Image (tube, rainbow, N blue to C red):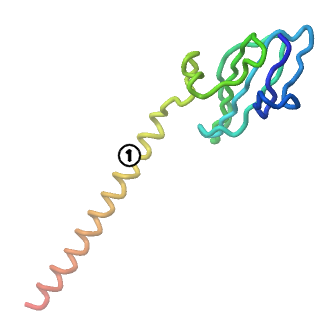
C-alpha cells in the first residue's frame, strides 16, 4: 500500500494524500461524534488497527468509531458504509426517547391543570353573582 487519505479526503489532490511508511500496511479512519453528531474525522496510515466503536463522557457522550482497510486510498468512506461493516453509529437511546415523551405528557398535564383552574375560577365567579 502506498497512500492513505489525509483528513481532507480529496483523492484528486496529491498534497492531501498521506504517504505510508513501509511498516504501515493499513489505512484507518476515526469518526468522532459528540451527542451523535459528527464533529471530526481523522485519517492516517497505521501498522495495526481494530475496527470498533467506543463511548466515553459524563453527560456529553463522545463516541469514536474506527474503520480499517488495507488498499491504497481506501479510507474514503461514507456513513452508509459504516452500517455495512456492522458498526452501530446511531443507537437509539430509550432513556432519551422516554424523557422526551415524559416532557410532552408533562406539558399536556400542566395544560389541563391550567384549564381546570380557569374553569373553576369562572364557575366561582358565576355562583358568586347569583
Instruction: Give x and y (percent) for residue 53.
Output: 65, 22
Residue on which disc 1 sits: 101
Q: Secondary structure at mark 1?
A: helix
At 15% from the left edge and 79% from the top edge, which residue is drawn? Answer: 123
Instruction: Give x and y (percent) for residue 64.
Output: 68, 28
Q: How many marks?
A: 1
Instruction: Give x and y (percent) for residue 87.
Output: 58, 20
Judge left or right: residue 103 versus residue 113: right
Q: Nearer the viewer, residue 93 or 72?
A: 72
Q: Nearer the viewer, residue 34 or 107?
A: 34
Instruction: Give x and y (percent) for residue 23.
Output: 90, 8
Q: Quadrant of residue 74?
A: top right
At 69% from the left edge and 19% from the top edge, which residue is drawn? Answer: 67
Position of the C terminus, as image quadrant, is bottom left
Q: Residues within 10 Å of mark 1 (few under 14, many from 20)?
A: few
Residue situated furthest bottom in the rendering: 129
Position of the N terminus, as image quadrant, is top right
Q: Quadrant of residue 37?
A: top right
At 92% from the left edge and 9% from the top edge, which residue is drawn? Answer: 22
Judge left or right: residue 97 versus residue 108: right
Judge left or right: residue 84 versus residue 65: left
Q: Is residue 127 positioned above or below 59 on the image?
A: below
Judge left or right: residue 15 versus residue 83: right
Q: Is residue 14 positioned above or below 40 on the image?
A: above
Residue situated furthest left in the rendering: 130
At 70% from the left edge and 24% from the top edge, which residue is drawn? Answer: 76
Amino acid at each position: 500500500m502506498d497512500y492513505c487519505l489525509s483528513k481532507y479526503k480529496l483523492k484528486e489532490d496529491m498534497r492531501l494524500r498521506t504517504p505510508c511508511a513501509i511498516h504501515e500496511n493499513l489505512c484507518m479512519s476515526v469518526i468522532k461524534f459528540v451527542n451523535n453528531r459528527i464533529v471530526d474525522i481523522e485519517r492516517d496510515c497505521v501498522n495495526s488497527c481494530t475496527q470498533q466503536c467506543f463511548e466515553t463522557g459524563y453527560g456529553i457522550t463522545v463516541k469514536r468509531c474506527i474503520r480499517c482497510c488495507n488498499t491504497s486510498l481506501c479510507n474514503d468512506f461514507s456513513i452508509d458504509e459504516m452500517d455495512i461493516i456492522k458498526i452501530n453509529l446511531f443507537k437509539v437511546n430509550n432513556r432519551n426517547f422516554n424523557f422526551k415523551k415524559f416532557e410532552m405528557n408533562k406539558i399536556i398535564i400542566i395544560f389541563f391543570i391550567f384549564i381546570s383552574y380557569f374553569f373553576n375560577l369562572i364557575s366561582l365567579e358565576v355562583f358568586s353573582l347569583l
